[in-house]
Amino acid sequence: MVIRRFHSFSSWIESGMNMKSWILLLLAVHAASASALASHTYVSSAGDDLNPCTSTQPCRTFAMAINVTANSGTITAVDEASFGSVTIGKPLTINAGGRVAALMASSGSVITIKTMGAEDLVVLRGLSIDGLNAATSGIRVVAVGKLVIERCTIQNVAGHGIDFESSTNPSHLLVSDSTIAYNVDPSGVSSGVYDAAPYGSAVLDRVRVAGNNIGVQVRAARLSIRDSTISGNVQANVKLVAANVSQIDIDDSLIADSVAGVGIFSQGIVANVYVSNSTITGNSQGLSTLIGSIYSFGNNRLFGNTTDGAFTAKMPLD
């Protein structure tokens, strides 16, 4: 066998490997690499990150499973354990499979999401996300097309539980059947849900947000709260502060027990909160505005606050 040495890329090509062949080789290598990614991978407390992340040979961490999971694939937890912190850079689903699959971090973000496409969908299902009273965010969203959070718990973060600041245009957040609690920053600025996505819209459906510095805070775009309990948050349960047109819609929800703070606060000429069929009670101040507006559809219950405050105006029910 004769091994030839080539002193430059050009001499290698001249030896018989023309540019077309070289490109075809690169494409073949790329295709082989892509085909190695799996549509469904697994993690386990007994797994090993040297494994291929299959159901019979699971990985130990979600981070490793992400590396070998194809776009729009699914990662499933086989049993209950802590599977580390992760950065998600592709569309995929992380599924606890009905088990207590925990993600923990003592610094930075427990989960960071930064995907490239406006159509990218990330789903987080059944996860327990814990910041160990030290992480700066539970879920930090830098960019995503759509993020769906189902049946998750986000707690003990020394910052925002969900920090939704996606730069993608448009971007969407849906949180359902989840609890976001006890996310407390010593400086007092953290929120259970912080929405500052300039091109975003968000929905909280059947969500409990409790014991944070601020429950739900919106700084941009639009957020809807439905069939939820926002209670016991220190500074405010729901807070809208907007320099640009922004809106919060609250329907069939309980806004309660901010004993030293505000039930609903609106600040900004273009900051509008619309409330229907909801109860605002047990707060130091039920409603408060600073230039902003809080509108009622006439079917709310505003009572039992130290100071109830008043709605800006009544909207007609169509």
Image (spheres, rainbow, N blue to C red):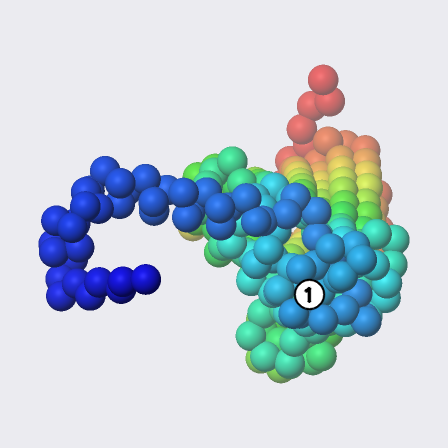
- Seen in the picture, residue 117 relative to 99 is either above or below; the reply is above
Q: How many marks?
A: 1
Asked if residue 152 is positioned above or below residue 102 in the image, the reply reads: above
Q: Nearer the viewer, residue 254 or 44?
A: 44
Asked whether residue 207 is in view, the answer is no
Height in image: 158 above or below 118?
below
Element on which disc 1 rests: loop
Q: Tell me the residue at 65%/44% (across/down).
A: 39
- Residue that numbered label 1 is attached to: 51
Quadrant of the image occupied by residue 156: bottom right
Q: Which of 48 and 87 is in front in this view?
A: 48
Reply above or below: 168 against 47. Answer: above
In the image, residue 28 lies at what x, y percent? 40, 43
| 141 and 92: which is toward the camera | 92
Q: In which quarter of the image is the C terminus?
A: top right
191 to the left or right of 143: right
The location of residue 117, given as percent across then percent down, is 46, 41
In-front residue for pair 268/170? 170
Give the percent coordinates (x, y) of residue 290. 53, 54
Residue depicted at x 21% and y 46%:
17
What's the residue at 76%, 69% (across, down)?
47
Q: On the rendered structure, is 145 left or right of 16?
A: right
The reply to whether residue 151 is visible in this rendering is: yes
